[in-house]
């Protein structure tokens, strides 16, 4: 998922396109921001009137007029505050709504990609795309977005008012603003590169932490605590160094805003005093100009403050759009068809598959599995048997050839129908941090408690469920950590049962199970497989012995197929695998 080099402006435009809620009512928000600024212009006008007409009037100070005009200025300030507050609230609400939708959209797109794309990225980095990267965008929109809206309106109105009061001083201010803007453009290019590095470092840190926590048992088993801590510390220090460099540049930029504000103010005072009344610059006019300069400088300073946020947000946008722009390589057909109910046949016709970074993993595979057939897929590690299983479930699409189920080419089958009729049970049954019953319902979300209980009874697992502390309501913990490997597999089998598939694909569900549960699991498997087409990636050849026939893979090719007895008598690849397995079990 490569990141496109979007400029900051284009990145922010892209986020408006991807999160339409941000634009909803934007016209009203901008109008409120402009109105609040326009009301603020009343203040310098009143100041000029107070000084020239009330304080420095030939007949002396008019206290009543001064208080009246001062009251008008205070009222204008209060109204402006309320209006601008309304603009801030509106944009904050829209930001929360739009970026929540963006997070869900990014997450959903990740789930629509094939396992190739997901497995090519580190989990922590993917998590950062829908967490910290979106947070960076939201922080900018919540604060910087309003600041930029109000600031833009304030700069335009303040400059217009200055041109009305004293055009020469206004041109002086405009020249300073243009020079400073040119410097900001140069600075933002540097910040853009630095913030891209920060977002990548954050992803690296999350990936390293996720890996270290997930592999905690292995780390402790091999005494790798020190090495792991050193690795994590190194990644965190790299993120810290990058953030410090970015902060240093941002701080320098922020300080420059203070220098700019002081320089512009001093220049206006100097030129205004020197020009004096010869150019029509009264004391009130000069004070009004200083108020207007402050109104202009304030949003410029806000812009500088938010520029750092904008770069961080743009870096987040680039990482998110890298996900959204990744083409779905295993698409759900828009005009797809549904598979028929019942046991289904599976056919491979000259199927070839190649991973992007290597050669062919499967080469010209052709086979037919009849409805209700019980098939074992065997071969050495790396022979292509797991890829074969992924093609059946359409976790991957072949590079060539056709896979059909129930006579329908898989690319023509709607995902919803495919997931209902073809179920994959991995070697390690993954469970979510929920109850046993809720994990079973992943097979059929609308299943009632009674239907979940019936599934366990059908598989003769009801006594096991009854032995749990809270029965089917027992929480399994993150990744099912509160259950043993065998117990997690029992839940996975119940999940497959309640889905009632026509084709069942298993990655040797008993290969990593404690012996005490193996008999129970095999009994449940026999009930689960009965009447269904089953394809088992077999790590134990006892599974192959009990199958109707066996597919033997070697270096990506289907080299043998037949019953266990036929293949042993053939004396080929399968016979050699079987001899090695028998020798291993005899030891």
Image (cartoon, helix red, strand yellow):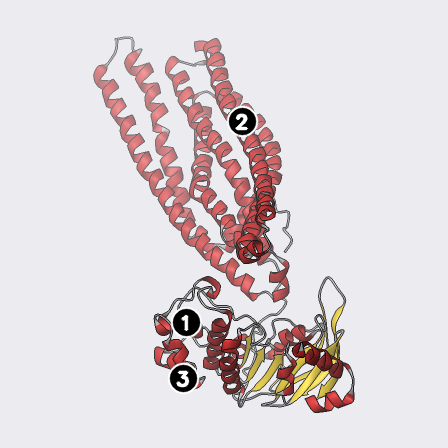
Q: What secondary structure is found at the residue carrying circle 2?
A: helix
- Work out how far the residue at label 1 is from the one at label 2, CA to CA, in angstroms: 65 Å
In this rendered view, identify the residue nearer to me: 118 or 332. Answer: 118
Residue 401: x and y, percent? 72, 78
**Taking 211 as reference, is 421 above or below it?**
below
Quarter containing the N terminus: bottom right
In this rendered view, identify the residue nearer to me: 227 or 245. Answer: 227
Q: Dot 1, how many residues are within 10 Å of its Cα: few (below 14), some (14-19), or many (20+)?
A: many
Residue where numbered disc 2 is placed: 177
Please tell me which of labels 1 and 3 falls first in the chain: 1
Please tell me which of labels 3 and 2 falls first in the chain: 2
Residue drawn at (52%, 40%) of the image: 310
Residue where numbered disc 1 is placed: 436
Residue 145: x and y, percent? 45, 42
Residue drawn at (60%, 32%) of the image: 187
In this rendered view, identify the residue nearer to me: 563 or 271. Answer: 563
Residue drawn at (48%, 9%) of the image: 274
- Work out how far the residue at label 1 is from the one at label 3, CA to CA, in angstroms: 14 Å
Please tell me which of labels 1 and 2 falls first in the chain: 2
Q: What secondary structure is found at the residue carrying circle 3?
A: helix
For residue 572, what is the image quadrant? bottom right
């Amino acid at each position: 998922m490569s990141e496109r080099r979007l400029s900051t402006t284009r990145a922010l435009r892209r986020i408006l396109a991807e999160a339409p809620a941000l634009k909803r009512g934007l016209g009203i928000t901008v109008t409120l921001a402009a109105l609040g600024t326009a009301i603020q212009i009343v203040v310098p006008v009143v100041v000029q009137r107070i000084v020239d007409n009330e304080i420095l009037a030939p007949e002396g100070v008019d206290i009543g007029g001064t208080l009246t005009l001062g009251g008008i200025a205070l009222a204008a300030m209060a109204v402006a505050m309320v209006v601008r507050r309304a603009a801030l609230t509106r944009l904050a609400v829209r930001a929360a709504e739009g970026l929540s939708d963006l997070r869900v959209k990014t997450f959903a797109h990740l789930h629509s990609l094939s396992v190739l794309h997901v497995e090519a990225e580190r989990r922590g980095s993917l998590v950062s795309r829908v967490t910290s990267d979106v947070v960076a965008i939201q922080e900018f929109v919540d604060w910087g977005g309003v600041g930029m809206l109000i600031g833009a309106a304030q700069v335009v109105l303040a400059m217009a008012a200055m041109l009305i009061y004293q055009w020469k001083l206004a041109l002086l201010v405009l020249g300073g603003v243009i020079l400073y803007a040119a410097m900001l453009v140069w600075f933002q290019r540097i910040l853009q590169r630095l913030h891209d590095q920060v977002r990548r470092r954050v992803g690296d840190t999350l990936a390293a932490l996720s890996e270290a926590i997930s592999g905690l048992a292995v780390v402790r088993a091999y005494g790798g605590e020190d090495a792991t801590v050193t690795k994590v510390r190194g990644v965190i220090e790299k993120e810290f160094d990058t953030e410090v460099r970015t902060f240093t540049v941002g701080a320098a930029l922020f300080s420059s805003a203070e220098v700019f504000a002081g320089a512009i103010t001093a220049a206006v005072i100097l030129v205004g005093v020197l020009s004096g009344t010869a150019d029509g610059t009264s004391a009130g006019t000069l004070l009004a100009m200083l108020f207007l300069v402050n109104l202009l400088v304030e949003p410029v300073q806000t812009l500088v403050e938010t520029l750092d946020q904008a770069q961080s947000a743009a870096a987040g946008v680039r990482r998110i759009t890298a996900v959204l722009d990744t083409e779905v390589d295993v698409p759900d057909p828009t005009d797809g068809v549904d598979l028929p109910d019942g046991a289904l046949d599976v056919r491979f016709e000259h199927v070839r598959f190649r991973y992007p970074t290597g050669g062919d993993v499967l080469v010209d595979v052709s086979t037919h599995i009849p409805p209700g057939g019980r098939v074992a897929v065997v071969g050495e590690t790396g022979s292509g048997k797991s890829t074969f299983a992924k093609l059946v479930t359409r976790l991957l699409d072949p590079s060539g050839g056709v896979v059909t189920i129930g006579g329908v080419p898989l690319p023509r089958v709607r995902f919803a129908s495919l997931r209902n009729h073809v179920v994959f049970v991995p070697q390690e049954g993954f469970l979510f941090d929920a109850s046993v019953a809720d994990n079973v319902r992943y097979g059929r979300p609308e299943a009632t408690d009674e239907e979940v209980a019936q599934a366990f009874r059908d598989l003769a697992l009801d006594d096991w469920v009854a032995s749990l502390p809270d029965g089917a309501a027992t929480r399994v913990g993150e990744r099912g950590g509160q259950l043993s490997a065998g117990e997690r597999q029992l839940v996975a089998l119940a999940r497959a049962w309640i889905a009632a598939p026509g084709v069942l694909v298993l990655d040797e569900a008993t290969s990593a199970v404690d012996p005490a549960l193996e008999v129970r699991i095999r009994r449940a498997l026999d009930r689960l497989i009965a009447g269904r087409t089953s394809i088992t990636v077999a790590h134990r050849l006892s599974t192959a012995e009990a199958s109707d026939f066996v597919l033997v893979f070697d270096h990506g090719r289907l080299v043998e197929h037949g019953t266990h007895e036929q293949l042993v008598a053939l004396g080929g690849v399968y016979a050699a695998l079987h001899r090695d397995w028998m020798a291993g079990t005899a030891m």
